[in-house]
Image (cartoon, grey):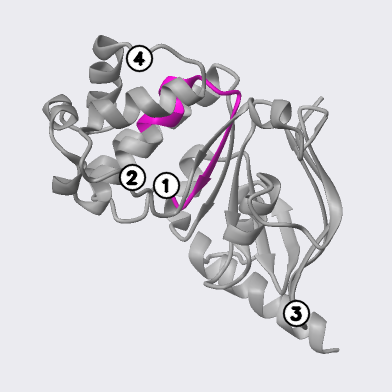
Amino acid sequence: MHALALAGVAKDYGSRRVLEHIDYTLEAGQAVALAGVNSAGKTTLLRGVLDLVHLSRGTVSIFGRDWRATAARSAVGYLPERFVPAPFATGSEVLRHLLALHGVRYDAARAADEAAALDLAPTALARPTREYSKGMAQKLGLLACILAGRRLLILDEPLSGLDPRARMRIKERLGRLKATGVTLFYSTHLLADVEELCDRIAILDGGRIVFDDPPAALQRSAPGASLEAAFLARLDQAAVSSST
């Protein structure tokens, strides 16, 4: 069974088309990076999958269930591009509340262990989140996703705003989750991180997915180039194709 299946997905904002007839499947246990330039529609696509954005056309299924059903989304953990916790609450209180929404009991010892694995000092959980940096807030949101134990994690730019050490720790933790069968679908601008974690990279451009293959295949398509250069070359090819 597919973890995620999109059929004919499209999104219009008035006369502006952001997503155009996207057919896409994501197998259970895979890690897939959704890449694209700014305003390519990555966040719109992720939010559409979660029914946080009303799709103009098309359907989505999550582990075989219609995406509009609450029961389907019970399998999903979601981290937005900018996670903004309640500023008056401590990190532990935020986690306790979010896990209660998932029907999961808060385990302080496990939360401290997982926080350390994400390079978030366990002592930070006792502090009000108004004292957190953007990177700390992102780690807290990801920590909530991990503790909830969902089968599919949808993450919007989870590594943005993090220093190299934190990125390394989070990639290691996500890799261990993937090894246990958790499916990862995340958007990113940091293509150097894709090679280490992902089975596939899907490039979104002009409202369509113009490439969907392993990162190594993307790099082979531009011999001698870095993954970033191969990504840009693929966008150039897509632009030429759409203009002819």
Q: Earlier in the sequence, mark 2 or mark 3?
A: 3
Q: The residue under label 3 is which amino acid type?
A: Gly
Q: Which one is in front, 28 or 72?
A: 72
Q: Which one is in front, 232 or 88?
A: 88
Disc number lying in front (2 or 1): 2
- Mark 4 vs mark 3, CA separation in Å: 43 Å
Q: Which one is in front, 10 or 227?
A: 10
The residue carrying pointer 1 sits among few (fewer than 14), some (14 to 19) or many (20 or more) residues within 10 Å by Cα, namely: many
Where does the N terminus fall, quadrant-wise?
top right
Drawn side of residue 103 relative to residue 122, left or right: right
Residue assigned mark 2: 138
Q: The residue under label 2 is which amino acid type?
A: Gln
Which element is circle 1 on?
Answer: loop
Drawn side of residue 191 relative to residue 54, left or right: left
- Tell whether position 155 is magenta: yes
Which portion, as a residue range, is magenta? 143-158
Q: Earlier in the sequence, mark 4 or mark 2?
A: 4
